[in-house]
Image (cartoon, coloured by chain):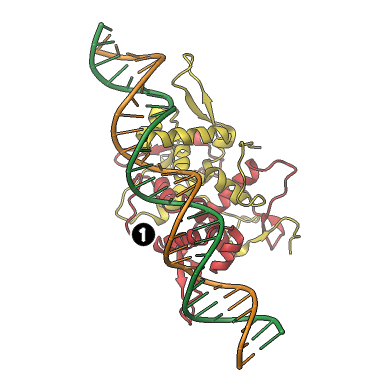
Chain colours: A yellow, B red, C orange, D green
Amino acid sequence: MLQPSGVDWTDPECPVARTADLVGDKWILLIIRDSLDGKRRFSEFERSLGVAKNILSDRLRLLVDRGILLRIPNDRGTRSEYELTSAGRDLFTLILSLRQWGERNAFSTDEAHSTLVDPATGEPVPQLRPLRESGAELTPEQTQLVKVGESTP
Amino acid sequence: MLQPSGVDWTDPECPVARTADLVGDKWILLIIRDSLDGKRRFSEFERSLGVAKNILSDRLRLLVDRGILLRIPNDRGTRSEYELTSAGRDLFTLILSLRQWGERNAFSTDEAHSTLVDPATGEPVPQLRPLRESGAELTPEQTQLVKVGESTP
DNA sequence: TTTAATTGGTTTCAATATGCAACCAACTGA
DNA sequence: TCAGTTGGTTGCATATTGAAACCAATTAAA
C-alpha cells in the first residue's frame, strides 16, 4: 500500500476520496498521462505541460512522496529521471477513463483530438465498460454503495 | 458536446487534459461521487463532504456551467436540487476507476473501506479492465499515442 | 401561533497556493 | 572555451481556499 507522509484523508473510508486526495489535481493527472506516454525528464514534462517550474517541482515531489513516481538520480547526482512505480502504472485505467470521457463529451464532432491506439491493429483502444459478473453493462442505478459496518441489503 | 463558458484548455487537442480541466479537482470529483450515489441537495453534499459552504457553492456553479449538473429550482424558487446530466452520468466509469485504484493501492489489508456492490448478486462490482479488441488485457506499453495530424505508425 | 431550527446560500478576512520572472550551479555541445 | 541547456530555487504579486459570521426564506416544534 502507498504510504504518503502526512496525508490526512478527506474521507478515510472512501476509496474514491483517498484517490482524489492523492491524484485529484490537474497537473498531477497530466504528469501521470505523460509518464504513461514514456516521458521521464523534468524538461519533458515542462515542455509538454507548459506548467510553471516551481509547480512542476512541487508536484513531482508530491508524486514521489505518494509512491506514484520513483526518482532515479543520474550518476552525476543531477538531472534525475522519474519513472512510474507499479501503483503509478496502475493508474493507466484511470487516465484511460479520463481520455475516453473527454473524447465522448468534451469535443464536438468537427474537432480533432489525439488518440490512443493499439499499434498491433492500428485501432483505437476499445471503450472501458463497467460490467456485472454476468457480462452485462452496469449503470450507476444498478449499483449500491455499502458503507463500512453496513451489511449488503 | 459540453459548452462551458470561458474555459481555456490547458492542452486543447488532448482529451485527458480537457477532462482534467473540467473535473480535475478534488471537490468536484467528490460531488460527482455523491451525485452518482443519489445525493441532490446542497446540505447533503455539505454534510457528506465537510467542505466550506462558499467552496461547495462555487463548485456546484462550475459543474452546472460545465454541463455536468443540472440545477432544478424548487417551486418556491429556493432550495434547488442538482441532478446529473447525461455527460455527468457518463462519469460513472471515471469515478469507478478512482474507486478501484484506491481499493487496490490506497488501503492496507487491515483497513476497511466502503464498497460498491451489484445488489442483484451482493457481489462487488467487477474490476474495469482495459482490453484490446481481441479481449486480451491491454498494458500502457501496448498502446501508442497518435497526436493530431500524425498518422498511426 | 409563536418560536426555534434548518436550509441554501453570501460576505469578510486571514492563510495558503499559484504562476511569473529572475536567478543559479552543473552539465553539454559546438 | 564559451554559449546554451537542464533542473531546479527564490521572491513577489495575485488568486484561491477555508473558517466564521451573517442572512432571508422555509420548516418543525411547542
Count neighbours of disc 1 (C-alpha within 10 A) and say few if under 14, some if 14 to 19, many if 20 or more.
some
Q: In this view of the protein, which residue sits in the foreground, A8 or B2?
A: A8
Residue B107 percent coordinates (x, y): 67, 43
For the point 35% across and 60% down, the residue is: B3
- The quadrant of the picture occupied by the N terminus of chain A is top right
Q: A58 left or right of A52? A: right
Residue B104 percent coordinates (x, y): 64, 42
Q: Is residue B46 above or below residue C15?
A: below
For the point 39% across and 30% down, the residue is: A44
Q: B15 left or right of B150? A: right
Q: Quadrant of residue A65?
A: top right
Q: In this view of the protein, which residue sits in the foreground, C18 or A72?
A: C18
Q: Is residue A148 above or below residue B101?
A: below
Q: B17 left or right of A6? A: left
Q: Is residue A50 above or below residue B39?
A: above
Q: In this view of the protein, which residue sits in the foreground, D12 or A144?
A: D12
User: Circle 1 sits in a helix, a strand or a loop, which is it?
Assistant: loop
Q: Chain of mark 1?
A: B
- The quadrant of the picture occupied by the C terminus of chain A is bottom right
Residue under circle 1? B4
Residue B127 percent coordinates (x, y): 62, 48
Which amino acid type is shown beneath numbered disc 1? Answer: Pro
- Residue B143 in view (yes/no): no
For the point 32% across and 57% down, the residue is: B6
